[in-house]
Image: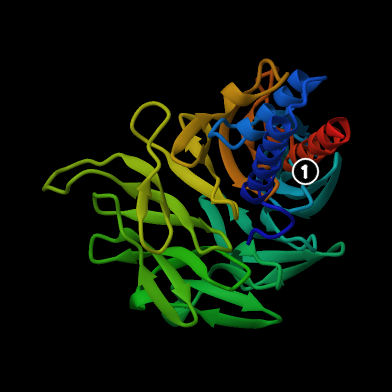
Amino acid sequence: MRTTLLTWATVLSASLAVAQSGIALLKARRVRRHSPALLVLLLLVSGANAGIPPGYTLTQIDVLEGGAYNEAWGLNELGQVVGACNIPHLGTHAFLWDNGHMTDLVTGRFAFAVNDSAEVVGADGHAGGFSDRGFLWQGGIAMNLPLAAYDINNNGLIAGQGRGYQNQDHAMLWQNGQTADLHPFGATTSGATALNDAGVVVGWFLEGVRTLKQAFLWNSGFATLLPRLGGLENFAWDINDAGQVVGWSEIGPWYEGATFSRHGFLWDGDALVDLGAIAGDWSIAYGINDAGVVVGASQWAFVWDEGAMWDLNDLLIDAPGWRLECAYDINTQGQIVGTGRNPQNLQRGFLLTPIPEPATLSLLAVGGLLLIRRRAR
């Protein structure tokens, strides 16, 4: 469900090309005056494409009035964030955060996703977790849905879990009052966790008498079983517009009585990649953007890109005292939402913004090249 604007990969590639052109021009014209500063600029821009992660500034997502703690789970391309806030004696409230302004959406519910039209979806909560009912909030009005809604794409198609055949919990889609039961592989229990703008869905189902979780991809009426890294179970959490899927899988060979660790995975339709772990022997991948950058948790919140996993706590700029515990979603601008502990040890949602941002890198590169050309004349 991630869209648009410019991806990190596209902008950084363009910036690198501009930087290389500038360096070539410097050599060709034998520019000497002020060239060291310009070279530093060009190397800074080109270095951003060398596998070095950006730093991040942190914005705290504050609680609603009277709130004790909150969690941030989803965001869109505009940087709007959704989640849930616990208010003592009043229960859980879904919220929409927009540039510092908090909107209390509905009581007793959890907001999981928001599209670029600021349409928010979520699920009803109860003591054991989430029910099979949810909501769609748009323009200040909340509408009840016949399914727990976990994702919504930019076409207004919603994915989640509701009561299907024989009143069992099934993966479902909903749009404009119409519900479709996906019923992958005839499983008695299943759920849809995410979808992209093409309507390709990922989720899970319970397989066999041992009710093992299995990840699936659903496209145009056909379900595909996703491969595992090992073990017996896997689970799909997100899919981008390129069709890349992330989630977790048990690892290691199976044998009777074996216990398994879990690692985050990235699957692109052909190759299955083990994302590894920061520390210990577990990780979970929750979100992926259209550039293939992955976020999740592995003891602490992480970002993964081009084969390397980074602890987001090590990449914070001027945010002392914060502990980022889990990262849930990332947009194409590289902004990340998740949950952690602030310097007062209070649980709060956060929004991370990469520095320098992709657009800034591009402007730096173009500006540097224009300056080089002027001084080379």
* Furthest residue in direction left, as rendered: 256
Q: Is label 1 in a helix, a strand or a loop?
A: helix
Identify the residue at horizontal 40%, vertical 55% (top origin). 235
**What percent of the width, then of the height, locates residue 336?**
65, 41
**Hey, what amino acid is under mark 1?**
Ala
**What percent of the width, then of the height, locates residue 159?**
58, 68
Q: Is residue 169 visible?
A: no
Colour scheme shown: rainbow
User: In the displayed structure, would residue 328 be above or below residue 215?
Assistant: above
User: In the displayed structure, would residue 92 be above or below residue 142?
Assistant: above
Q: Is 99 displayed left or right of 125 in the figure? A: right
Identify the residue at horizontal 53%, vertical 74% (top origin). 172
User: Total label count?
Assistant: 1
The quadrant where residue 122 appears: bottom right
The quadrant where residue 323 appears: top right
Q: 303 or 25, which is in the foreground?
A: 25
Decide: few, some or many residues near mark 1? Use Cα within 10 Å; few <14, some 14-19, many ≥20: some
Q: Which quarter of the image is occupied by the C terminus?
A: top right
Identify the residue at horizontal 71%, vertical 22% (top origin). 40
Identify the residue at horizontal 24%, vertical 49% (top origin). 231
**What percent of the width, then of the height, locates residue 30?**
73, 27
**What percent of the width, then of the height, locates residue 342?**
68, 23
Q: 249 or 126, which is in the foreground?
A: 249
Q: Which quarter of the image is occupied by the N terminus?
A: bottom right
Q: 273 or 66, which is in the foreground?
A: 273
Residue where numbered disc 1 is placed = 359
Q: Is residue 261 visible?
A: yes
User: In the displayed structure, would residue 292 be above or below residue 352?
Assistant: below
